[in-house]
Image (cartoon, grey):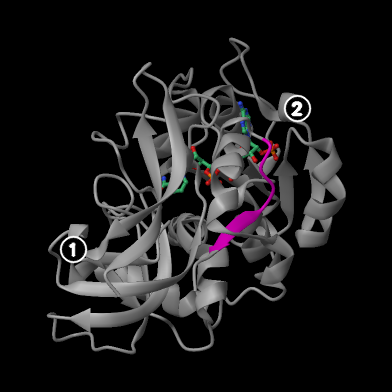
C-alpha cells in the first residue's frame, strides 16, 4: 500500500474553502511512531470548523480533518502497541494541525492512542467518539461536585447534536431525570426515545434579561451552546448545583454576573476533552465500555461514506445535525 484515500480541506484561489476526497502518498503521513489503519471515524463540530477554514482550529491547508478515529495498528515503533491492536485515537492535535481521522490511515504519537476497551466495538467507539468522551468528562465533573439523581433534573443543551445526544443517553441510563433543550421541534420524539423526560425550546432556557437570578429549576446542566443559554442555565440552577460548559455553537461569549456563584454557590465547570490526563481518559473509556456502557447506541448513528462527508459537514455548520454521524473507512 503506497497511497490512501483522505478528505482534504483546501483553500481555493478565490479565498473560499472546499473539501474533496483525494488519494495521497502514505509517505506524506507525519513521522509519528504509530500507524493506524482507520476503520471508522466520526464527525464533530470541530471538524466542520477545520474543514471550512477556521484558523483557530487549523492553520495550514490543504489539510485532512477528523478529530476521531478508530482502527487497527498497522505498525508501531512504540513498544506499548503492536500490529493488530484495536485502538481509539481522539482529541490532542488529531485533525487540527495533524492529518486526521477522515482518512484510511493516520500516524500519531503513542500517547494519543487508547486501547479499545473490552465490550466496545470499533464502530461503537466512534458512535461515542469525542462526543462520548466529552459527555463522560462532563458527567465525571458533575459527579465529583456532588450531583445525584434525587437532586432534580439535569438539563442538556444542543440536545440533538453529538455531545448533547450522547449526554442524554448516558445521564438517563444512570438514573438522572434529563431535560433536553433543543431548537429542533421535529427531534422531540427522538430525544424522548433517547431518555429525555422533557424537551424545552431554546427560548425557555436562554436568558438575556438583566435579572441576576431566575427561579431554581434544575440541579445541573451540560451546556454545548454557550452565550445566553449558558447564562440562563447558571441563573436557574439550584443552590450548590453545577453547570458543565463544553461548547460554543451559539457564542463563545456569555453575559454573566457573579450572583449565581456568590448567592447560590453554583459551580461552573470547564470541560476540555482535547487535553486531559491520559489516565483519566483511559478510565472514562473503560467506564464507557462497562458501568457507563450505553444500551442502544445505534439509535444515535448515521453511517456515511467519505464522499458524503462534505455535505454532512456543511449541515453541521448550519446547525441541522442529529446524533452522531460515523464514517466507514474499512
Ligand atoms: N469542550 C470540549 O472538549 C468539546 C468537545 C466536543 C465538542 N465541543 C463543543 O461542543 C459543541 C457541540 O459539539 P457537537 O459535536 O455536539 O456539535 P453538533 O453535533 O453540531 O451539535 C450542536 C447542536 O447544537 C444546537 N445548536 C446549533 N446551533 C445553535 C445555535 N445557534 N444556538 C443554540 N443551539 C444551537 C443544535 O441542537 P438543537 O437543534 O437540538 O438545539 C445542534 O445539533 C461545539 O461547540 C463543540 O465545539 C467541545
Q: Which residue is disc 1 drawn over?
A: 27
**As drawn, 117 above or below 180:** below
Q: Is residue 312 left or right of residue 257?
A: right
Q: Is residue 21 left or right of residue 301?
A: left
Is residue 147 visible to us here? no
Residue 16 placement (x, y as % from top left)? 41, 21
Residue 17 placement (x, y as % from top left)? 41, 28
First in sequence: mark 2 or mark 1?
1
Q: Is residue 272 left or right of residue 264?
A: left
User: Does the magenta segment cover residue 100?
Assistant: no
Is residue 234 visible to us here? yes
Question: Which is more toward the observer, 298 or 326?
Answer: 326
- Answer with the quadrant where ligand 1 appears in the image: top right
Quadrant (top left, top right, bottom left, bottom right) of the N terminus:
bottom left
Magenta stretch: give its range: 320-327
Residue extending farthest to the top is 210
**As drawn, 212 above or below 187:** above
Question: Which is more toward the observer, 145 or 35?
Answer: 35
Residue occupying the point 73% across, 57% down: 177
Residue occupying the point 28% across, 81% down: 74
Residue 93 placement (x, y as % from top left)? 26, 51
- How far is disc 2 from disc 1 in space, using C-alphas? 53 Å
Q: Which residue is disc 2 drawn over?
A: 204
Mark 1, secondary structure of its residue: helix
Mark 2, secondary structure of its residue: helix
Amino acid at each position: 500500500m503506497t497511497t490512501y484515500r483522505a478528505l482534504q480541506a483546501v483553500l481555493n484561489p478565490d479565498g473560499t474553502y472546499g473539501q474533496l476526497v483525494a488519494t495521497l502518498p502514505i509517505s506524506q503521513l507525519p513521522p509519528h511512531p504509530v500507524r493506524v489503519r482507520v476503520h471508522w471515524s466520526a464527525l464533530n463540530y470541530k471538524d466542520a470548523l477545520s474543514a471550512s477554514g477556521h484558523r483557530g482550529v487549523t492553520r495550514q491547508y490543504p489539510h485532512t480533518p477528523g478529530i476521531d478515529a478508530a482502527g487497527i495498528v498497522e505498525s508501531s515503533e512504540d513498544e506499548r502497541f503492536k500490529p493488530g491492536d484495536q485502538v481509539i485515537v481522539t482529541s490532542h492535535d488529531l485533525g487540527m494541525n495533524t492529518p486526521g481521522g477522515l482518512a484510511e490511515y493516520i500516524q500519531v504519537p503513542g500517547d494519543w492512542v487508547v486501547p479499545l476497551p473490552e465490550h466496545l466495538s470499533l464502530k461503537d467507539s466512534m458512535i461515542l467518539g469525542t462526543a462520548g468522551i466529552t459527555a463522560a468528562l462532563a458527567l465525571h465533573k458533575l459527579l465529583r461536585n456532588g450531583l445525584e439523581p434525587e437532586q432534580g433534573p439535569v438539563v442538556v443543551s444542543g440536545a440533538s447534536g453529538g455531545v448533547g445526544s450522547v449526554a442524554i443517553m448516558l445521564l438517563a441510563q444512570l438514573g438522572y431525570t434529563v431535560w433536553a433543550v433543543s431548537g429542533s421541534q421535529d427531534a422531540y420524539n427522538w430525544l424522548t426515545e433517547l431518555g429525555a423526560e422533557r424537551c424545552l425550546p431554546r427560548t425557555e432556557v436562554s436568558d438575556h434579561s438583566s435579572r441576576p437570578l431566575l427561579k431554581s429549576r434544575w440541579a445541573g446542566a451540560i451546556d454545548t451552546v454557550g452565550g445566553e443559554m449558558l447564562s440562563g442555565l447558571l441563573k436557574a440552577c439550584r443552590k450548590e448545583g453545577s453547570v458543565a460548559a463544553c461548547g460554543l455553537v451559539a457564542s463563545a461569549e456569555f453575559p454573566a454576573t457573579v450572583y449565581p456563584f456568590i448567592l447560590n454557590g453554583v459551580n461552573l465547570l470547564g470541560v476540555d476533552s482535547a487535553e486531559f490526563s491520559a489516565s483519566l481518559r483511559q478510565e472514562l473509556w473503560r467506564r464507557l465500555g462497562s458501568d457507563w456502557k450505553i444500551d442502544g447506541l445505534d439509535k444515535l448513528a448515521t453511517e456515511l461514506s467519505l464522499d458524503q462527508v462534505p455535505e454532512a459537514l456543511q449541515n453541521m455548520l448550519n446547525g441541522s445535525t442529529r446524533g452522531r454521524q460515523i464514517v466507514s473507512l474499512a
